[in-house]
Amino acid sequence: MSVAPAWGRTSSLRRHRRRRRVSDAGAVVLAVVLLIWWLLPVYNMMLIALDPEGNTEFTGDIWPTAPTLEAFRGVVFQRYWYLQDFWHQFGNSFFIGIMTMALTVLISSLAGFALGRMRLGKGG
């Protein structure tokens, strides 16, 4: 009777566990990098929107010293000349988005029905 097969099996098991840990660590690092990549623009938009003067991103501050919702009030109540037709433009964008979604669902459902009716494989 030999001890070698049992020792070889535990060595293989250790390598598998080590490879699994490295793979899991790599997945976590990738997930963190992708999360930061996704959240950074959102953070930057909120930073600019909450700053009363809109130039916080150039000062190097992590958060505005006196955050305010004044910029949002300006948009909602159309206080600036370039926001004069904001709600009309917003309605147009909403309508185009809804129509695009409806057309995409219609075409996709028809294509899905056609693909579902197709016979796949040999023999017909």
Image: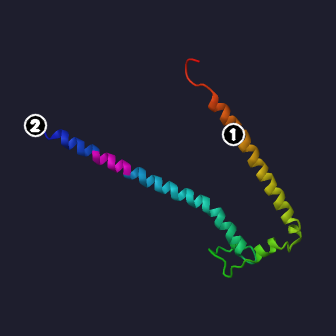
> Regarding mark 1 in the picture, which secondary structure is present there?
helix
What residue lies at 87% left-to-right and 67% top-to-bottom?
82
Extreme residue in the left direction: 1
Measured from the top left, where is residue 25 in percent x and y?
A: 43, 55
What residue lies at 69% left-to-right and 39% top-to-bottom?
109
Decide whether the magenta segment is chiefly helix, strand or loop. Answer: helix
> Regarding mark 2 in the picture, which secondary structure is present there?
loop
Measured from the top left, where is residue 3 in percent x and y?
A: 14, 41
Extreme residue in the top direction: 123
Mark-to-mark CA distance, 2 and 1: 66 Å
**Rendered position, 15 above or below 33:** above
Quarter of the view holding residue 86: bottom right
What residue lies at 71% left-to-right and 44% top-to-bottom?
105
The numbered disc on residue 8 is: none
The numbered disc on residue 1 is: 2
Q: Is residue 24 left or right of residue 76?
A: left
**Rendered position, 117 above or below 91:** above
Q: Is residue 84 left or right of residue 114?
A: right
What residue lies at 78% left-to-right and 75% top-to-bottom?
73
Location of the N terminus by quadrant is top left
**Residue 57 visible in image:** no
| Residue linked to disc 1 | 109
Extreme residue in the bottom direction: 66
Q: Are marks 2 and 1 in contact (CB under 8 Å)?
A: no
**Residue 105 visible in image:** yes
- Earlier residue among tags 2 and 1: 2
Category of crowding for the residue at label 1, using alpha-carbon neighbours closer than 10 angstroms: few (below 14), some (14–19), many (at least 20): few
Measured from the top left, where is residue 74 in percent x and y?
A: 81, 74
Q: Which residues are magenta?
A: 13-20
**Residue 18 is one of the magenta-drawn residues:** yes
- Give amino acid for label 1: Ser
